[in-house]
Image: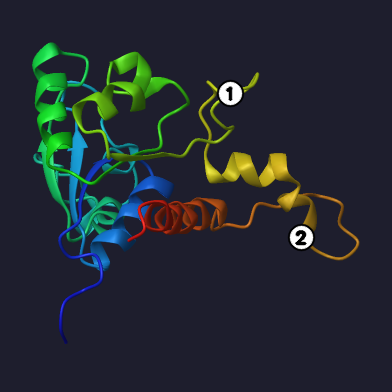
Amino acid sequence: MGNLPLEGIRIADCTQAWAGPHCTQHLADLGAEVIKVEPPYGATRGDRKASSGTYAEGKEGGKPWNKQTVFNMLNRQKLSISLDLTKTAGKRLFKELVKISDIVLDNYAAGVMDRLGVGYEVLREVKPDIIVASSNGWGPSGPWASYHSYGVIQESMSGYMAMTGYLGDETPYRSGVDHIDPVTGMHMSHTSMVCGDL
């Protein structure tokens, strides 16, 4: 079949939940080497999809890592590393990863990467041509920028839920799929490729 289009591209993936991992899942499917960066198990909650939802065979078991089905679906074909970005050693190792990467992606609330000491200005000192793409619910600035968000919140705030439901029923209904998460992931993957001229 030949080479995949993004072979040779390395991505440091600091995404979590659905939208961000959906983005990097597509980039991995296109051949990019995606390295998922997570905190050490037990140190913090880590990726929310890894700590909630449906487990294979219906039970978490004694070792929950690699058993959560949605997490596994969204993170297929990715490598992973545990780094505590609140610690000096974690930041140092992350910067070493950035030196050999092409793109850094995150979907934390606005300002989190800066507060961790690994925001764009710091990372471009480490690697001047690094591409950094960040996606959050309410944009990088403004009165809501620091708030966390999920697709279901975006559905209600955007008016999407007002377009669902049944004739004659004024009750807004969620889509049941939270479309905004995967749509955001697809837009983020496309933007990363276009901005990086990939």
What is the quadrant of residue 49 in the picture? Answer: top left
Instruction: Select label 1 or label 2 by which is in front.
Output: 1
- Could one spot residue 103 in this view of the protein? yes
Residue at horizontal 33%, vertical 37%? 48
Q: Looking at the picture, tell me which residue is in the foreground, 147 or 178.
A: 147
Where residue 39 appears, as percent x and y from the top left, is 18, 28
Which residue is pictured at 40% across the width and 56% down the height?
189
Q: Nearer the viewer, residue 40 or 171?
A: 40
- Marks 1 and 2, the one that precedes in the sequence: 1
Q: Please identify the quarter of the rendering in which residue 50 is found.
A: top left
Determine whether, in the image, residue 97 is placed left or right of residue 136. Answer: left
User: In the rendering, at what x and y percent does residue 32 appear?
Assistant: 21, 60
Helix, strand or loop at label 2? It is: loop
Q: Amino acid at mark 2?
A: Gly
Q: Residue under label 2, please give it.
A: 165
Q: Locate residue 15 relative to residue 88 in the image: left or right.
A: right
Residue farthest along the bottom direction in this orientation: 1
Give amino acid for label 1.
Answer: Ser
Residue at horizontal 57 percent and vertical 24 percent from the top: 145
For the N terminus, the quadrant is bottom left
Coordinates of residue 81 in the picture (x, y in percent): 11, 38
Say what secondary structure mark 1 lies in: loop
Q: Mark on residue 141?
A: 1
Q: Residue at x 52, y 57 (%)?
A: 183
The quarter of the rendered structure image containing the C terminus is bottom left
Nearest the camera: 24 or 152?
A: 24
Does the residue at mark 1 contact the one at mark 2 (Cβ under 8 Å)? no
Whole-Å distance between the Cαs marked 1 and 2? 33 Å
Q: Residue 69, which numbered label?
A: none
Seen in the picture, residue 36 relative to 74 is either above or below; the reply is: above
Is 195 situated above or below 82?
A: below
